[in-house]
Image: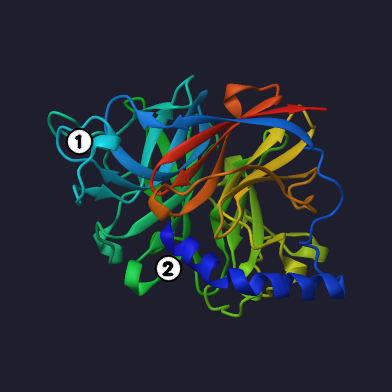
Amino acid sequence: MLWYLTIFTSLLAASVLADKQRRQDGTDPTQPVGTNPISKFETKYLGQQNPNNSCSHRDLGFTGELQGKWYAVYGDTLWCASGVTDPASDPAGFHGIVRDAVSLMTDDPLVVVDLHLNDDTPVRHQLQFVPFNTAWGEDNTYGFGGTSLFETANGAGGVFYLVNANDAGLKGTGVAKVELVNGEPTVIQRFGDNGYWWPSDSTPRYGDVAAFRDPRSDYVYAWGGAPTSITDSIGAQYVYLLRVKAADAYDLDRYEYWWGPDGWKMGQPLTEFGAQRAVAWFIGQGQLVWSEFYECYIFVHLSPGGSDVLLRTATSLEGPWTPDVKVYTATPIDGGLTYAGVAHPYLNPSGQTLIVSYTNNNHIELLKVTFSK
């Protein structure tokens, strides 16, 4: 997902001026409102996450639940060299890659079980999670950056993903149907004539910023950045929202789009863009969780182009959101990028602690944040 960070980094200098301008006119509903209840906390660095049955470098790792188990969806997954069991011992060079992968979470956030392994010996490596389709002009170099798995109905699930054609640009975002096959989440169908529903040049990239199965309603929500045709430094950083009842996730006509002051409109994708239709501005990829401890939603993300791990809160998924609270500042590994905040709520349903992970130069690092009032 380096393209995402490149866009953010290149526009970071413009953000300060843009923020000042928007605050002056007082018409931007994406601006922070109120007081963040997260004021007393302790943060502990836990270490790096690795699989117990394979070996690779990876990014993202957004978590989601399917049939009572939690899984992580990763982006670029770089295989380690043959026979290497510890990523820290991996020699320099390219040893193979898949553009996304899925793993089973365990009770230890530092340990995952990789799924869909190939026949490499002596160490097996992960295969692609969202498959490419040559009939749509795709090949094994295409990226399929995905966010959280979500449960739909009758034991099935879904995942949002972004089709990235590399030098040819971003194609669009779509939804895939996921079922457990031999006990492993498996993509069995991608929707849309070209494998996606929302073209990147004319609609927001829904699901690429975040996706969330709301435990307090019947809905799945997905946040997406502005269409790629919007290139000005302010407009390109707005984030838009859609939702769908989980049981209807495979039916495009049942999706509802947030039109700001005009509320939700079913089957009517946005045709107007800007502050009044958006729900956020200049945020990193992240993940949401309902906090029983604070009785509100928490959005976990990293400062765009920076290394601060941030938490903001809201009582409604449409916003408004409180100001961010910084809970940690990561130290980039070898000068690399830090991005993609991830929540692990299944490890403590009470919400008094929250395990957070993020990508640090293709390593997944974890924190434990303990809250108090």
Mark 1 vs 2, N-terminal side: 1
Apparent side of residue 4 relative to residue 274 in the rendered image (left or right): left
User: Which residue has dot 2 on it?
Assistant: 170
Q: Quadrant of the N terminus?
A: bottom left
- Residue 199 percent location from the top left of the image: 49, 69
Task: Find residue 294 and report its image quarter.
Answer: top right
Amino acid tagged 2? Leu
- Residue 331 percent location from the top left of the image: 50, 46
Q: Nearer the viewer, residue 68 or 57?
A: 57
Apparent side of residue 39 relative to residue 214 in the rendered image (left or right): right
Q: Is residue 159 visible?
A: no
Apparent side of residue 209 relative to residue 32 in the rendered image (left or right): left
Identified at 70% across, 21% down, the residue is 350
Say which mark, if any, is on residue 296: none
- Separation of marks 1 and 2 at Cα, in angstroms: 28 Å
Q: Is residue 255 visible?
A: yes
Q: Quadrant of the C terminus?
A: top right
Amino acid tagged 1? Asn
In the image, residue 370 above or below residue 228: above
- Residue 38 percent location from the top left of the image: 77, 37
| Tag 1 and tag 2, C-beta contact below 8 Å | no
User: Which residue has dot 1 on it?
Assistant: 118
